[in-house]
Image: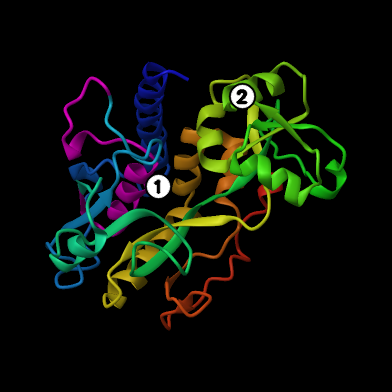
């Protein structure tokens, strides 16, 4: 996909998201437009956040589709668009706050936290060895090597990896997804293609029944292909979280509640559907519990004492 298509996609989906959210607002759901009509009483204040009435969130403009600048806009933070921008805006609105974006590309999260330049940062993998230290809130999206198929409805098909033994699945040569196919399904499964475009083209043309790619980037690019959607994450999904300073338990707890709220009122699904399509969004949203936990070097993430969300109240994504 060329750069023009990517930029156009960012603009088109940002506009589509705002239109969809306006419908949710008219239905009584929370919105993110920041208009006076939607103004709420802030639920948190300093010192939990650095500036009263404002949630300052760091996003990385080099990580499309999480965040990026449209080609025809200046590289100023207020012009940023992307998944992280939309979700941060939804969280701010849920908390009755205005959103201030900070482009953290090339910056140190630890230094930004230390200087109190931001309240939180988006797009951090939910792992114990995370390069960004702090309390992880989420996940708000799932990623990892995933399977893609042609799906001509909005219903997510049921795919069992065990049934795919001996099936040729298109994947970019020497990619993580290609290696995952060999490890999780069986040797010789990966139908090596020169790049992801070739793999998705083969899938769209019916040369193969499945393709493999990173769940997030693949779902974003799949919208350029007819009816191609993410249908299953292979192996253990990788959660993508927001991170706040370790010592700010109050902010972690508050954001965890806000993230659960935008999940339950449909805003999170709306964001993911507009960037990935409804079927892929069901996979990337998943049913993983939303909680806050501190990454550490001694093993599994440990909770910070907050109540754990089991995720049992989430709808079955296969019925989406």
Q: Quadrant of residue 120?
A: bottom left
> Quadrant of the image for the C terminus?
top right
**Mark found first going from the N terminus, 2 or 1:** 1
Q: Residue at x 72, y 44 (%)?
A: 181
Q: Nearer the viewer, residue 189 or 260?
A: 189
Above or below: residue 59 compared with residue 241: above
Q: Is residue 295 magenta-colored? A: no
Q: Is residue 84 magenta-colored? A: yes
* Badge 2 element: loop
* Badge 1 element: loop
Q: Position of residue 203 (x, y in %)?
A: 70, 23
Instruction: Please say whether residue 223 is visible from this viewpoint.
Output: yes
Q: Nearer the viewer, residue 193 or 24?
A: 193
Region in magenta: 71-100
Mark 2 lies on residue: 194
Residue density around tag 2, few if under 14, some if 14–19, many if 20 or more, within 10 Å: few
Q: Residue at x 32, y 50 (%)?
A: 88
Q: Position of residue 313 (x, y in %)?
A: 60, 64
Q: Is residue 255 left or right of residue 313?
A: left
Q: Quadrant of residue 288?
A: bottom right
Count up the numbered dots.
Answer: 2
Tag of residue 28:
1
Q: Position of residue 34 (x, y in %)?
A: 23, 44
């Amino acid at each position: 996909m060329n750069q023009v298509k990517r930029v156009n996609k960012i603009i088109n989906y940002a506009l589509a998201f705002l239109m969809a959210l306006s419908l949710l607002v008219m239905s009584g759901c929370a919105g993110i437009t920041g208009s006076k009509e939607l103004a709420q009483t802030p639920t948190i204040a300093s010192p939990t956040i650095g500036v009263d009435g404002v949630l300052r969130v760091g996003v990385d403009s080099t990580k499309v589709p999480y965040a990026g600048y449209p080609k025809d806009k200046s590289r100023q933070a207020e012009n940023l668009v992307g998944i992280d921008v939309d979700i941060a805006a939804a969280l701010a609105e849920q908390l009755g706050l205005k959103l201030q974006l900070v482009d953290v590309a090339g910056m140190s999260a630890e230094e930004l936290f230390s200087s109190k330049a931001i309240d939180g940062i988006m797009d951090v993998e939910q792992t114990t060895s995370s390069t960004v230290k702090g309390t992880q809130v989420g996940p708000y999206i799932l990623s990892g090597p995933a399977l893609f198929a042609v799906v001509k409805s909005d219903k997510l098909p049921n795919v069992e990896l065990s049934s795919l033994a001996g099936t040729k699945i298109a994947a970019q040569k020497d990619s993580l997804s290609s290696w995952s196919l060999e490890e999780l399904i069986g040797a010789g499964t990966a139908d090596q293609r020169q790049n992801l475009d070739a793999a998705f083209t083969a899938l769209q043309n019916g040369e193969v029944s499945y393709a493999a790619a990173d769940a997030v980037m693949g779902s974003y690019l799949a919208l350029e292909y007819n009816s191609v959607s993410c249908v299953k994450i292979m192996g253990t999904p990788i959660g993508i979280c927001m991170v706040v300073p370790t010592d700010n338990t109050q902010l972690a707890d508050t954001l965890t509640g806000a993230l659960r709220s935008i999940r339950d009122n449909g805003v999170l699904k709306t964001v993911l559907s507009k960037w990935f399509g409804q079927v892929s969004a069901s996979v990337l949203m998943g049913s993983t519990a939303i909680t806050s936990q501190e990454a550490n070097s001694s093993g599994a993430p440990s909770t910070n004492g907050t109540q754990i969300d089991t995720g049992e109240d989430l709808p079955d994504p296969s019925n989406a």
